[in-house]
Amino acid sequence: MSESPEHDEDFVRLIKDLPFDDAPSRVHRETLHRDVMSRYDRVQAKTTDSHGEFQVPPKRMFLRASLRWAIIAVVCVLGIFVWLMIPGSQTPELAFRRLAIAVADARTAQFQIDLTQETRAEHIVRALFQAPGRFRQEKSQDNEFTVTIVDEPAAKQITLFPATRTAVVSVPDVSAERTVADDFFQLRDFLSRNRDLNSSSFRRVGTRQIDGRAAIGFVADTKFGECTLWGDARTGNPLRIELVQQTKRRRTTMRKFELNIVLEESLFELAPPEGYKVNVADDPEKAAP
């Protein structure tokens, strides 16, 4: 304000006489509302098609299509997994081929053997195999522990009797009675030449539980006896192999398989351990102390 009251009063009077209208107006509000809604409608029309449906921007449409195909791919993969892994979902031909390949192509193997011949039962604690033809069996019977090592390519065999520190060295005789090593070697050779169910003499015998696992079984009459194979329905690895020779009343059961594991070379050493007495014989059983 100025220092002169008269001038102030003149200024206030002048302001009041100006044609300004600052009071709220209903007409003004309605006009402003129509203007805002008109602008909104023009913007909305740019993102709708001729039918009034919302149009997704091109980038978002690409991402949505990619997600849809990704879901379809995952469903397909899960379907294949279920078909391969769930017992009964895969064909017998595929199940047999997986089992045959697992046994025939194994580079190493460790398993347990139960052997019964007539009324005499034997229990082999551990059997070890190393391709192409080395075999070791550790047997405990009548409170006696023995180790037999066979090298088929070298045509050599040694049997160790730790209790008496005796080693019997011999040459395996193909005309002699079959051994567990012979059974396993011939089985691998047979499966390597008969990997397809249709071209082999095997037939499916159904499914069962072995050691808590679902197993698929196949049986065949072979030149080394009736052979029954039980394979893991999920992995195809062998769970149990049963060989029965009716004429000799001999049954061999192989189980608890571990394939392609690391085995030390010393386990298949043919040289007698230091301090052992060495006997040479054609038949290790006859030369046993």
Image: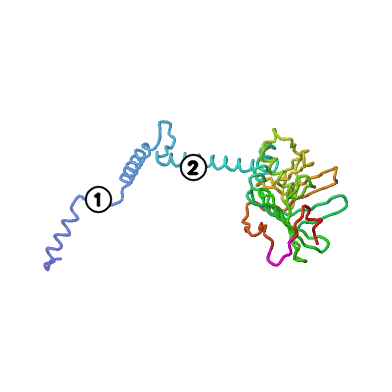
Image quadrant for the C terminus?
Answer: bottom right
Residue appearing at x 65%, y 45% in the figure = 102
Residue at left 69%, top 52%? Answer: 156
Residue at point 82% right, 44% down?
245
Q: Residue at x 17, y 59 (%)?
A: 12
Residue 186 locus on image (x, y percent): 72, 43
* Quarter of the view holding residue 110: bottom right
State the image quarter where residue 284 is shown: bottom right
Q: Say which quadrant the N terminus sits in.
A: bottom left
Report the coloring of the rendering: rainbow
Viewer-proximal residue among 6 and 136: 136
Please tell me whether residue 241 is drawn above or below residue 281 in the rendered image: above
Q: Which mark is residue 260?
A: none
Q: Amino acid type of disc 1?
A: Asp
Q: Which residue is mark 1?
A: 21
Q: Tell me, yes or no, whether the two marked residues, 1 and 2, touch with CB atoms within 8 Å.
A: no
Farthest top residue? Answer: 50
Q: Secondary structure at mark 2?
A: helix
Circle 1 Cα neighbour tier, 10 Å, few/some/many (<14 / 14–19 / ≥20) = few
Q: What's under tag 2, amino acid-wise?
A: Leu
Q: Is residue 158 magenta?
A: no
| Residue identified by numbered label 2 | 67
Please state which of residues 207 and 130 is positioned toward the viewer in this rendering. Answer: 130
Residue 214 in the image: state x and y as whole percent.
72, 47
Q: Which residues are magenta?
A: 273-278
- Cα–Cα gap, marks 1 and 2: 60 Å
**Is residue 121 left or right of 10 when viewed as pictured?**
right
Secondary structure found at label 1 = loop
